[in-house]
């Protein structure tokens, strides 16, 4: 009898602390960026988001993001610039077709629905740790995750030294996910 009770308790404990699994919905998500070129803001976006998200706001130690976007989808509404950005000196999409992020830690910030994620961003074969705040809002059968971070493009060997092109760019995330 004690064994049965122990098994039941263990089953419920495991099922309670296991984060739910979600899949990002590319058509409803947006990965965008802003960078200055000749002092003017240039906006762009990437598509093809895929991967897996495990998220439970009550069990963050079991939560994780492992997602990527298709680097070949870079779009700044300027086809000549986009073609150049896909080449070897910028994203080199033939060799490095994906930009990926894998979280290593997710923690609460103290504000309801707001979290901090730490993880590894890999772009053009270079992996660097990053940390940023994000919100997680429950939606029908999933979550909406929103956040932003700033990186130095040269840390990832994207483009060389350039006076007109800023080294720093901001990435904005608006990810819609569905429960698996």
Image (spheres, helix red, strand yellow):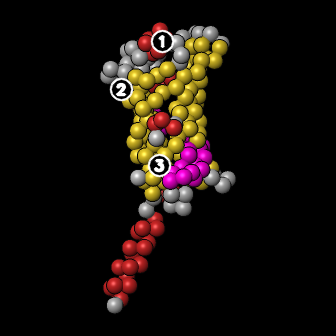
- The residue identified by callout 2 is 97
Q: Residue at x 51, y 51 (%)?
A: 142
Q: Earlier in the sequence, mark 3 or mark 1?
A: 1
Quick check: 78 above or below 172?
A: above
Residue 165, picture quadrant: top right
The spot of residue 120 in percent (x, y) is: 45, 39
Q: Residue at x 58, y 21 (%)?
A: 43
- The residue identified by callout 3 is 178
Residues at marks 1 and 2, CA–CA distance in whole angstroms: 18 Å
* Residue 93 visible in the picture: yes
The spot of residue 152 in percent (x, y) is: 54, 25
Is the residue under label 3 in contact with that under label 2 (CB below 8 Å)?
Answer: no
Q: Earlier in the sequence, mark 1 or mark 2?
A: 1
**Neighbour tally class for label 1: few under 14, some 14-19, many 20 plus, Cα within 10 Å:** few
- Residue 79 tag number: 1
Q: Residue at x 49, y 20 (%)?
A: 75
Q: Left or right? Give the position of 165 relative to 96.
A: right
* Residue 168 visible in the picture: no
Residues at marks 2 and 3, CA–CA distance in whole angstroms: 25 Å
Nearer to us in this view, 153 or 176: 176
Principal secondary structure, stretch drawn in magenta? strand
Q: Earlier in the sequence, mark 2 or mark 3?
A: 2
Nearer to us in this view, 80 or 17: 80
Nearer to us of marks 2 and 3 is 3
Nearer to us in this view, 170 or 152: 170
Residue 110, picture quadrant: bottom right
Q: Which residues are magenta?
A: 127-145
Residue 118 is inside the magenta segment = no
Residue 173, picture quadrant: top right
Residues at marks 3 and 1, CA–CA distance in whole angstroms: 32 Å
């Amino acid at each position: 009898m004690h064994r049965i009770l122990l098994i039941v308790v263990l089953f419920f404990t495991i099922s309670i602390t296991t984060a739910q699994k979600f899949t990002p919905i590319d058509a409803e998500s947006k990965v965008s960026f802003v960078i200055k070129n000749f002092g003017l803001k240039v906006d762009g976006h990437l598509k093809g988001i895929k991967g897996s998200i495990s998220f439970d706001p009550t069990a963050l130690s079991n939560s994780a993001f492992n997602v990527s976007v298709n680097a070949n989808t870079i779009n700044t509404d300027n086809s000549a610039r986009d073609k150049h950005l896909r080449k070897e000196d910028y994203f080199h999409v033939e060799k490095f077709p994906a930009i990926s992020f894998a979280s290593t830690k997710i923690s609460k910030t103290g504000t309801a629905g707001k979290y901090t994620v730490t993880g590894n961003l890999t772009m053009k074969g270079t992996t660097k740790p990053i940390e940023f705040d994000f919100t997680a809002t429950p939606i029908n059968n999933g979550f909406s995750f929103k956040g932003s971070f700033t990186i130095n493009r040269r840390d990832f060997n994207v483009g060389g030294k350039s006076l007109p092109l800023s080294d720093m760019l901001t990435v904005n995330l608006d990810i819609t996910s569905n429960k698996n």
